[in-house]
Amino acid sequence: MLTTGTVTGTTESGTRHSMRIGRGFGEVRRLECDSCGWSRVAQFDVLGKADRHLADHGVCTAGECSDPGPETSALHPGPLPWLLCALGMLTLLVVVVVRTVTG
């Protein structure tokens, strides 16, 4: 699974829980809980499903906390979107240079 983001949260006792969000086939996203191993394939409302699962662990999510901290239920995108963008730009540059030289 290519991890594209992480939803994390902390219980009142200080235990940290996290859910990894990754890419599946097409528009499908895969959710995996690092705490209990729970996994699910979802197409819509991926962040909401991750928040609801973390709430099952007793993690205070953004919609339920009276005073959410900066780390509570925050999406931390990984480097994959930046790498894919850079790869696309490099490919475009190579195509333009090759067409200019051969054309």
Image (cartoon, helix red, strand yellow):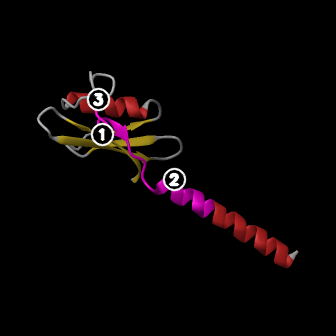
Between the residue at mark 3 and the residue at mark 2, the CA separation in whole angstroms equals 27 Å
Between the residue at mark 3 and the residue at mark 1, the CA separation in whole angstroms equals 8 Å
Using the image, determine if residue 76 lies above or below residue 51: below
Is label 3 in contact with label 1 (beta carbons under 8 Å)?
no
Task: Determine which residue is flagged by label 3.
Answer: 68
Which residue extends farthest bottom?
A: 101
Amino acid at pointer 3: Pro
Helix or strand or loop: what does disc 2 sit on? helix
> Where residue 42 sits in the image (x, y, percent)?
42, 35
> Where residue 100 sits in the image (x, y, percent)?
84, 73
Amino acid at pointer 2: Pro
Task: Determine which residue is flagged by label 2.
Answer: 81
Which of the two labelled residues, at mark 1 and mark 2, occupies the earlier sequence position? 1
**In the image shown, does 30 or 17 lie closer to the viewer?**
17
Q: Residues within 10 Å of mark 3 (few under 14, many from 20)?
A: some
Extent of the magenta region: 68-88
Which residue extends farthest left?
A: 13
Amino acid at pointer 1: Glu
Instruction: Identify the residue shown where x is 47% and y is 56%.
Output: 80
Mark nearest the camera among 3 and 2 is 3
Was residue 74 drawn as part of the magenta stretch in this picture?
A: yes
Task: Determine which residue is flagged by label 1.
Answer: 71
Q: Residues within 10 Å of mark 2 (few under 14, many from 20)?
A: few
* Left or right of 103 in this view: 89: left
